[in-house]
Amino acid sequence: MTSDTISHPPNGFLSALSADDYELIRPHLRIADLVQDAVLVEVGERLKRAYLPHRGVISLVVKLAKGEHVQIAMVGRDSIFGAFSALADPAAINSAVVLVPGVASTVELDRLRDAADRSAGLRALLARHGLAAYAQIQQIAGCNAVHSVEARLARCLLQTHDLSGERELVLTQESLAQMIGARRNSVSLVANSLQQANVIHYSRGHIEVTDLEGLSRTSCECYAAVKEQYERLLRPRCRC
């Protein structure tokens, strides 16, 4: 992590801030590399800083009693990880791991909380981004409960593509299984099926999305539902 301040990075949350609200946090922004598989916080730990990706994707994960890890949401270049923590309890209610490597702006949570205390507009924006993440968590919970592995994998790949801005993703079978709450052998079979349908190219953890429309047809309605909620909550005031 460097100590250099930055001007106005390509992140949806920062781009949606008014000039005055942006100036409240601009001096405290720092750049950090998002290293794949890096753990940003464990459940129960105090979150020390918020992350605003420019590139890359952060996976929000719950750990179950038997050791399973299941992804409940993703945060990418359109949002912020740490919105609700800045408004309320800083103790993390889930773990956060870097799914796709990249770069992010970071700001110490205490600094962000101080800025929110001074601006109703900033508090409202944090609340909307927190609600968007909550809407995603709800939708994914329902999706993992009732939809097929193929539909869930297509949904996750579409989301990851959107959030990272990358057509080629480095995702292991273990990561994919965690993303959709499925067994690794099921993920392998479905990934091979999608490759045979010329929707993706999959080789040794490298996934290239070759047919976005085909992947969209394979996905369940949850991809569109999450996207619609984000559009409703975030886009009206976003100038990114």
Image (spheres, helix red, strand yellow):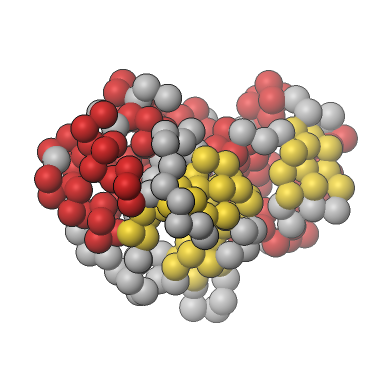
Horizontally, is 125 left or right of 36 in the view? left
For the point 30% across and 69% down, the residue is 91
Examine the rendering and report whether any part of residue 207 can be seen.
Answer: yes
The percent position of residue 82, horizontal first and vertical second, equals 35, 54
For the point 55% across and 37% down, the residue is 163
- In the image, residue 105 sits, relative to residue 215, either above or below, namely below
The percent position of residue 39, horizontal first and vertical second, equals 53, 67
- Which of 35/200 is in front? 35
For the point 35% across and 66% down, the residue is 47
Q: Quadrant of residue 233?
A: top left
- In the image, residue 84 sits, relative to residue 53, either above or below, namely below
The percent position of residue 102, horizontal first and vertical second, equals 60, 48
Which residue ends up furthest to the bottom in the rendered image?
Answer: 66
Which residue ends up furthest to the front in the rendered image?
Answer: 4
Horizontally, is 86 left or right of 63 in the view? left
Q: How many badges with numbers are in the image?
A: 0
Examine the rendering and report whether any part of residue 229 can be seen.
Answer: no
Q: Quadrant of residue 68?
A: bottom right
The percent position of residue 66, horizontal first and vertical second, equals 55, 78
- Which of 161/194 is in front? 161
- For the C terminus, the quadrant is top left
For the point 45% across and 57% down, the residue is 3
Horizontally, is 155 left or right of 116 in the view? right
- Which of 59/77 is in front? 77
- Which of 23/180 is in front? 23
